[in-house]
Every structure is written in structure tokens, then in C-alpha cells.
Image (cartoon, rainbow, N blue to C red):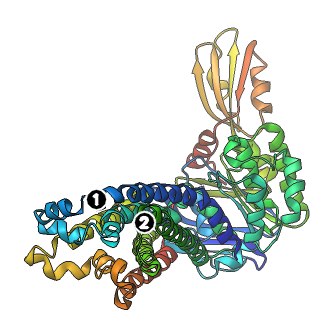
Amino acid sequence: MSALLGVSMRTQRRAVIGWGIGLAAVATMYAAFYPSVKESASELEGYLQNMPEAFRTLIGGDYTSPAGYLRAELFSLLGPILFLVYAVGAGGRTIAGEEEARSLDLLLATRLTRTQVVRDKAVALLAAMCALSAFLFVIVVVVGRPFDLTVPVEDAAAACVMLLLIGLAFASVALAVGCATGRKSRAYGVTGAIAVATYILNALAPSVSALGWTRPLSPFRWYLDPDPLTTGLHAANVAVLLGITVVGMALSLLTFQRRDLAS
Amino acid sequence: MDADDVIVAERLTKSYGSSRGIVELSFSVRAGEVFGFLGPNGAGKSTTIRTMLDFIRPTDGRVTVFGTEPRIDPQAIHTRTGYMPGEFGLYERMHVHAYLEAFAAFRAGAGRARIEPLAERLDLDLGRPIHELSHGNKQKVGMVQAFMHEPELLVLDEPTQGLDPLIQQTFYALIDEVRARGGTVFLSSHILPEVERVCDRVGIIREGRLLTVDDVGDLKAKALRSVIFHFASPVDASVFTPLPSVVAVDPRGDAIALTVRGELDEVVKEAARHTVVNVETREPSLEEIFLRAYRDGGAP
């Protein structure tokens, strides 16, 4: 392992532990609500029938089954929000944060090349997000059990992998904006705006016919449809999200190589 | 230009949208010398340095370090160079020792053995977390990482800012040691006495333009000083005007303010013919020394 990778992983450790605790708390809270949701299943299903279609698409129907409940509460909204906040924050900070903190010049004055710096820091970010995703998987499997919130282990794993992949896609976009501009706020702003816009697009497109064709443009379409919690992984969905990540990474390396660095 | 020049700048230019930047700088730094790069804040010192290390790229002209253009092979330069920026950030969560160990690792282990001796000489506590350090102690961390791998070239950007005087002396001693082992130093500063103390030659930069490159000794001879004589009664100021060393005369009631180039001998002898109540001399600011000297045609 390179020295820079080691340092980058060490400096992220605290944040990863903090976010892990947060994810665990959220997952546990939702799991604890599940028994009461199951009890009033029929009333809730009736209630949901009367909700607007866009909302139902988002939740994905079948709210009271374990898979439906997990998707609606954890994997379709709060999970992606938490994951993306981490991903965009960490991705945006990776280069732009060092540049604004004026620690980048010192790093680049050693034998490390610009490419090595981006690469090692991106790998550290990847490791942190893998750790968070794996941790969430364990939480979902272990904490769900006492509350009857059980889904097949491979389905829980598939959902966590897809969450990881959409996180990586947005992390690489934030990394690229940070690499291109050297500004954290720019990276957060641009990537956050893309995330919100494409999330809404994915939610609205099925019910607004004029927008129907735009839905494939949303990474969330590839994250959630078909639902990994009931249908597992799909090659096309994995490929699209990985593709975004690879393009983001390539743009990061390219733009950072060509640019004047701020002092 | 010479084969053993370590740094060669030829019409090096970096333009920004605003007025900041550097304009057609040409100079060379010889192997084994301590070169001072003197100028007020905002003159373009850091911009020049950062083009030498490929952090920014020139818009025109070029610079080479060890015969290499930074853009082409920055690592070839970085491997042989130690760099201390004027302002820098450290990894606040790390301990000093772990930080410096990591920097040794970033240089393939070079300098690891010198961390402790250098820290001891600079009175830097290696066991503390960086976020607890004062500004001066953070400067020391920057110094250790620049010096520890005994590079052939040291590039130091305003390195003594915020250092207490005792540590400054240690710092000057470190530079003398680099010179003694044949290393080259490029030191930017806005403090004239510092440059006088450590440098062999000095380039003076102002508003992005290089005014002159000179031996430090010659520079001192050309430097302007301001002297104010307070007399017991008004003295005819014109008696000072013919003296060759006097650049400007400014009568102020019983006092006369003089701007003098080089030694004070002539003016003191002239003043002594009258009753002198008090003498004030002032270490002139950079602006006064250089701006006036060179603008008023005082340059050689």
C-alpha cells in the first residue's frame, strides 16, 4: 500500500466511523418501527392507494412486506441521502479541500505526481465507501432479524452494492468538479444540484408523459429499477453506475493534470 | 546562461486576468549559491516559485530547473528539491512525527533519519498533534520536511515569517550548512537584513518585474538610507545638495531630512560643522530603497 493511501485512509477513519454510527442508528430506528407497520398493514396499503402516483412509484408499492418496507424507508430516500451526502462531501474535499487548506503544494513537492495523488486519494475514498456499504449490509441483516424485518441475505447485499455504486458515481462527479475547479463549494453545489434534479426526474418521469424519455438520464433510475431488494443485481444497472464513476475518475485525472493550482 | 546554472528563467511570464502576475523575468541561479529573491508582498515571488515547481504554468517565456522544464518532468525536479511555501496547511489530525514520516515515505524514505536531529535543533516536539501547534511550530514542521532529505536545491518562500529570533538563527545556520555542502538555495523574502545575512546574490522584484540582480555587497552600497539631523538653529539645506552621496534633501524647520546612498561619512562630516541636537536614522523600507533608487536613474 502506498504511503499516501495509508495517510488518506487514516485521515478518513474518524469520519467513516461517525457515518457508520449514523447509518446504524437510522437503520435500527426504522427496523424498530417495522412491527407496528406490519400490524396495521391493511390500513396502510389502503391509505397508500390514495396517494399520487409519483409518490407510489417512489415507494415502489408493497410497503408492508420486509423488502417493500426496507426499500421505501431506507433504500429509496434516506439511505441514498446519507450516502450521497458523504460521497459528495468526501469526493469534493479530496483535491479541492487540500487545495483550499494549502496542503496540496507540500504533497506535490515530493516525488508524488498529480496522477498518483488523485489516484491514491480516490482509492481511499472507495475504501471508505465500501466500508460504509458493508457495514450497512451487516446492520440490515442483523438488526432486522429481531423485528421480523428479514430479506434474503443476497438481496440485502444487492441493495447495499447498488447504494455503494450510486454513491461512487456521485463521489466521482464531486471529485471531478473539485479537480477541475479547486473549489469545494463548487464541487458540493454542482454535484448536489445534479443529485437533486436527477432524483426528482426519476420520481416524476413515470407519471409525467412529457418527461418519460428523460428517465434513463437519471442515475437513480439505474439504482432503483428494477428493485435490487427483490430482483438482485442487473448487469446493465451496474454498468451504467460504474460507467459514470469511470468517466468521473477520468475527467478528474485529466482536468487536474492540466490546471494551475491555487496557492 | 551556464551549464551549471540550477535555475534559469527566460522572459518568464505569468499573466492573470487582473494585474497580478510576473512579466518577462530573466535570471539564473548558479549551482552552490544562496540566491535571494527580494520584494514586497504581492510582487510575484510566490508566482515565480510556483512556476519553478509546476504548480502553475507560465503563459510565456520559460523556466528550467536542473535543465528540465517543470511541465515536462516535475518529478525530476521535485526529487532533488526541498520546498517550503510561504503559507501552507498541514494535516491537523496527524501527529508531527507521523506527518514527517509520511513525507519521508512520499520521497521513497529519503530523510527519515534526519527527522529527529532536525526537530531537536529547531526545538520541535514530535509527539504532539499538529492542531495543537502554534504558527511558529507549524513553520518548523514545514522547515523539517524541506530540509530533511538534504536536497540539492532548497526553494524557500518567506520561510522566517512567524519564527522567533532564536529559531531564525538556527534556520540561517541550516542554510549555511546547505551552502557548505554545495547545495543551492532560492530564498524569497521581503526583509532586507535577512537577505543581507544569508544570500550571495539577490534579485529584486516589484510588481511582477525584476528590477535588478546584484551581489549583496553591491546592493548595500547602492541602498538608500534616510537620516534626519536636528540642529540647534536652522541650517541652509543647500550645503548638503552638492554631496555625491546625497539623493534628496528635505528641510523641516530646524531639522533636515536627507536621503543618502551608501556610506554616511560625507553627510555626518558636513552636519558636524553645525550644532547637532539629535540624529535619527531609519532602516529604509524596501519601497524607499529600491523604488527610488532605480526609478530615479540610480541604477548602474
Residue reaching furthest to the bottom: A235
Which residue sits at x=78%, y=18%?
Answer: B273
**B43 to A201, vertically: above or below:** above
Residue toward you, A64 or B122: A64
Q: In the rendered structure, which amino acid carries the disc numbered 1?
A: Glu
Residue reaching furthest to the top: B232
SS under mark 2: helix
**A8 to A252, vertically: above or below:** above
The x, y position of residue B117, in whole percent, is 90, 55
Using the rendered image of the protein, determine whether residue A107 is visible from the camera's viewpoint: yes
Instruction: Pick the quarter of the image with the C terminus of chain B.
Output: bottom right
Residue beneath label 1, please?
A39
SS under mark 1: helix
The x, y position of residue A70, in whole percent, is 35, 67
Which residue sits at x=69%, y=13%?
Answer: B231
The disc label shown at residue A94, or none = none
The subunit carrying tag 1 is A
The x, y position of residue A166, in whole percent, is 39, 74
Mark 1 neighbour density, 10 Å: few (under 14) some (14–19) many (20 or more): few
Q: Quadrant of residue A116?
A: bottom right
Using the rendered image of the protein, determine whether residue A260 is visible from the camera's viewpoint: no
Can marks 2 and 1 be said to lie on one chain? yes
Q: Earlier in the sequence, mark 2 or mark 1?
A: 1
Which residue sits at x=71%, y=50%?
Answer: B159
The disc label shown at residue A181, or none = 2
Instruction: Pick the quarter of the image with the N terminus of chain B.
Output: bottom right
Q: In the rendered structure, which amino acid carries the disc numbered 2?
A: Thr
Task: Give the left or right position of residue A244, taking residue B77 as reference.
Answer: left
Q: Quadrant of residue B282?
A: top right
Q: Quadrant of residue B110?
A: bottom right
User: Cα distance, mark 2 to mark 1?
Assistant: 52 Å
